[in-house]
Structures are given as structure tokens and as C-alpha cells.
Amino acid sequence: MNKLPPKTIFITGATSGFGKATARVFNNNGWQTIITGRRGDRLETIAKELGQNCLPLAFDVSDRKAVEKEIENLPPDFSNITVLCNNAGLALGLEGADKANLDDWDEMIDTNIKGLVYCTRAILPIMVNNKNGHIINIGSVAGSYPYPGGNVYGGTKAFVSQFSLNLRADLVEKGINVTSIEPGLAETEFSIVRFKGDVQKARKVYENTTYIKPEDVADTIYWTANRPKNININRIEIMAGFQAFNPFNIVKS
């Protein structure tokens, strides 16, 4: 009997955190993994760990031409993408909207929205041609629940959630599933990036609390991607055990 070829997942932002953990889970379960990110040295290290079933691609998802070039030139053995995991994203700064850095806002929009859109649009024709596929977008609880300083970051993640729903409406007749996975407090390099390398400040975010681990999100992504074809998981919201909702902010004179 002919052996079925391995399934392939394309993961953006795979150099750390959720993306790296997701690559490991899928690879350990026999999938081919295409891992992408801006830091080529990290990608090479991860690819060496995962072996020949892993293809590292170093590029910036916010660079539309780079995204199109890399996907158009995928090696034949890796070209039939089964799952796209749009994980690349970041938050920058925690200042109020009147004091925020516009360059930070631009970078969040470019990565969290444009990068996700570019990768999705480039890979969709592959899935449509195969009449099979699953797009898993990594959002955030910040897209549903506002907090001081969340401004543009929360706005970009609200886009991820709504874009996922609209994608599903477009693709329901084409055999393609779409899911938005929206984690809360998780310890990755997220806060280090947000505070621009200030490790001590980042650590304080997680002090004396129980947070989500990258492996928790990776397991959720794997579970979602392996549901029976007659089921579409629209949205999964995950909060840490020590995290809940804020009361309304009422300013009294």
C-alpha cells in the first residue's frame, strides 16, 4: 500500500513562544512543519532540532513581496499546506493613546493585521485548489476586553477575531475551516518585546500568578487542527487560572 504523505503546517512567528511550541507538537506527531520568522539563526536551530521534516523560512510577514516570493517558491514536498497558523504578532508599549508612539502603532498594525492578511491571501489558493485546509489565527483576549494601554494592540486582535469569522463565511463552501484562538496571560517573550527588552519589567507581569504556557496553546492548536472534518471550531478563548475580567472603570469627580 502507498503511504500517505505527511500533512504540512505553515507557522508564522515560530522563533519563540506559541509558534515554537506549536512546531514541536506537530512535528512530534508526524507533520511536516514550515517555520517562519525574522530571526534566521533561531529558525535554523529549531529546524536542526526538528529534523528533515522541518523547513525554515526567514522573512518578515509585514513584507508583502517577501511573503509572496517565499510561498510561490516552496519546495514541492512542502507545497501542499494543510494548516496555516497565523501566529506572528506583537504588542509594543503600554502608554495611553495620547502618549503612545506612532511608530509602535504602525508596527503592530503591519505585523498583527497586514502580516496575517498577506500570509492568508498567499496560501489560500493552495487550500482552495486542494478543497481542503484549516486557517488558525492567533488572536488575544485583548481583542474582546479592553484595558488601559491596550489601544492599538487590542484593536489589531479584534480584527483577527472578526477577520476569522468573515473568512469562514467566504470559505465554508470550499472545504476550508477557520478558527480564532484567543489566549490571555501567557509567559512568552511577549512582555519582553512590549517593554522593549526590559526583562525585569516583563517579569513583574507574571509575578505571583499562574499563567498559560506556550505548550498549553500549542496543544490547543493541535487539537483544533485535528477535529473531524464535519466540525469547525469558530473561536476558542483561553484565560489563565489567575485571570478574569476587570470591573468597569468609573471616574468620579
Image: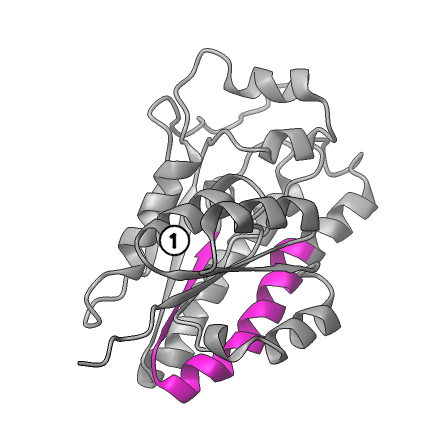
Residue 59 x/y as whole percent? 70, 60
Kind of residue at disc 1:
Asn
Up-down relation of residue 9 to residue 133 (above or below): above
* The residue positioned farthest toward the bottom in the image shown: 129
- Depth order, front residue of 12/105: 12
The quadrant the C terminus occupies is top right
Left or right of 69? Residue 167 is left
Up-down relation of residue 125 to residue 223 (above or below): below
The quadrant the N terminus occupies is bottom left
Left or right of 140? Residue 203 is right
- Depth order, front residue of 39/178: 39
User: Which secondary structure, mark 1?
Assistant: helix
Q: Residue drawn 52% across and 39% down?
A: 17
Q: Is residue 136 visible?
A: yes
Mark 1 — residue? Answer: 27
- Depth order, front residue of 252/234: 234
Decide whether residue 131 is among the magenta residues. Answer: yes
Left or right of 232? Residue 190 is right
Q: Residue drawn 66% across and 63% down?
A: 114
Q: Residue drawn 76% across and 52% down?
A: 106
On the image, which quarter does residue 209 sit in?
Answer: top left
Q: For the residue carrying disc 1, how many other residues have a C-alpha within 10 Å: few (<14), some (14-19), or many (20+)?
A: many
**Predominant secondary structure, magenta span:** helix
Residue 108 x/y as whole percent? 69, 50
On the image, which quarter does residue 238 sit in?
Answer: top left
Residue 189 x/y as whole percent? 59, 33
Q: Residue drawn 22% across and 71% down?
A: 229
Left or right of 93? Residue 189 is left
Up-down relation of residue 62 to residue 184 (above or below): below
Q: Which residues are magenta?
A: 111-138
